[in-house]
Image (spheres, grey):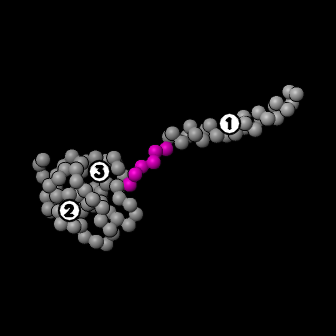
Amino acid sequence: MTIRKTRRTLPGLLVTALTAPLLLAGCAFQIQDRVCGSGSYPVKAVGNPDGGDCVVDGQEPPEGYVRYPAGKVPEYVGDEWDRYWDTVTVDEDGRVVPN
């Protein structure tokens, strides 16, 4: 009787032993949301510290929006540049102006 009980619990223990490290490692990985989806790029609203939108690649920003400077484009929600651009206002030339 003891052998049967062991045979039934062994697969369960094996699954638990293999799954636990994967679940614990999953906590170390963060899934980040992109500012814009594939095929588009982010733009900053003129005169609005937290305004922005996404524009289809190959198209110019609509009136009232400007491109971010090269090297300062936010890629992920909450990244360094996303947080920075939420604290400043830009003019129609993309220059930072006092709030």
Expressed as whole percent of the image width and height from the top left, the position of residue 15 reads 70, 39
Q: Quadrant of residue 58?
A: bottom left
Looking at the image, is 35 positioned above or below residue 78?
Answer: below
Q: Which mark is residue 51?
A: none
Q: Residue at x 29, y 50 (%)?
A: 82
**Residue at far bottom of view:** 58
> Pointer 2: what residue?
65
Q: Is residue 95 visible?
A: no
Q: Name the dominant secondary structure of the magenta segment.
A: loop
User: Residue 89 in the image: x percent, y percent?
Assistant: 16, 52
Pair 3/1: label in front:
1
Q: Is residue 90 above or below residue 21?
A: below
Q: Which residue is mark 3?
A: 81
Residue 69: x and y in percent read 24, 60
Query: Is 84 on the left-hand or right-hand side of 23?
Result: left
Q: Residue 13 vs residue 47: left or right?
A: right
The verdict on residue 81 being magenta is no
Give the residue number, with chain letter if any, for mark 1: 17
Q: Which kind of residue does numbered mark 1 sit on? A: Ala
Are circles 3 and 1 on residues that touch, CB within 8 Å? no
Question: Mark 2: which amino acid?
Answer: Tyr
Read off the magenta span.
29-34
C-beta proximity under 8 Å, tags 2 and 1: no
